[in-house]
Image (cartoon, helix red, strand yellow):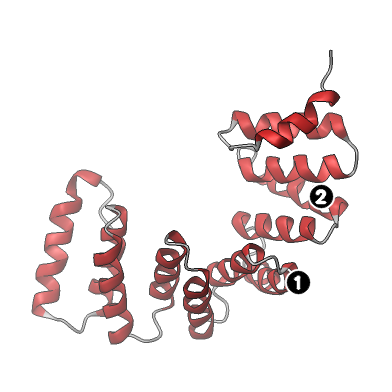
Amino acid sequence: MKDRYDDIDEYIADLKDEIGKNEQCATHHYNLGVALLSKRDFVAAEEALLEAVRNSPNLAEAYVQLGGICQDRGDLEGCLRYNEEAANCRPKFSVAWSNIAFVHVQRNDPDKALDAVDKALKWDPGFIQAMNVKAVALYMKGEYEKTEELCMAILNKEPHFAPAWMNLALACFEREDFGKAVQAADKAQELGYDVPEAFMEELRPHRGA
């Protein structure tokens, strides 16, 4: 896609022109879909991405983008289905496995989430988003020490990754390491994470005078 947003409309027009000359080019349809997503034109983007996979049924990236559109509108089943299709097309596609794990977390099924996210991390061990999904799944299973360890590993790589600070705060709170929980929650909030007010209230008695 064009690097400069100023050119996006021209870029979309150029892609449509190219598609007019060759309607079977899946790459042009895919690029058009991504460009339309950047303008948040989800309906047109979905149409372009569906056209991409019609012309190239193994275009895993397009299935992931379609899954993202489903997620945006709250359709977890659609998100799961498209990402499973992406993983079927390309078994080593870590993004698809991470997204599958995310859906299982949203469905309160941490065991399935861990099974999927471990596949993502097998193919991309440093994938921060996948590491964070795993941290959430571990927390859901009550494995707070492992959650804390994984959050620290994430933050060693990406110190400004706010969700990991939030997960660290939750894990430390459960382990009754309240001082560390307070620090982590404050850091998450400082980095723009919307820390639930109820949790901040739970931390209040553990703050210094």
Q: Mark 1 points at which residue?
A: 111
Indicate left or right for 192 with 72 as reference: right
For label 1, the crowd category at 10 Å Cα-Cα, with few meaning under 14, some 14 to 19 and many 20 or more, is: some
Look at mark 2 in the image and give the residue it sits on: 149
Q: How crowded is mark 2: few (under 14 residues within 10 Å), some or many (20 or more)?
A: some
41 and 77: which one is in front?
77
Q: Where is residue 154 in the image (x, y as percent from the top left)?
A: 69, 48
Residue type highlighted by circle 1: Asp
From the image, state whether disc 1 or disc 2 is nearer to you: 1
Q: In this view, does 13 lie above or below 158?
A: below
Provide residue 31's location: percent of width, then percent of height: 27, 66
Q: Position of residue 94 (x, y in %)?
A: 57, 70
Residue 209 relative to residue 35: left or right = right
Image mark count: 2
Instruction: Give the structural element (helix, strand or loop) at label 1.
Output: helix
Say the numbered circle drawn on residue 48.
none
- Name the spot of residue 58 as percent of width and height, x first: 41, 85
Q: Residue at point 27% right, 52% down?
A: 39
Work out whether residue 114 or residue 3 is closer to the camera in this orientation and state it. Answer: 114
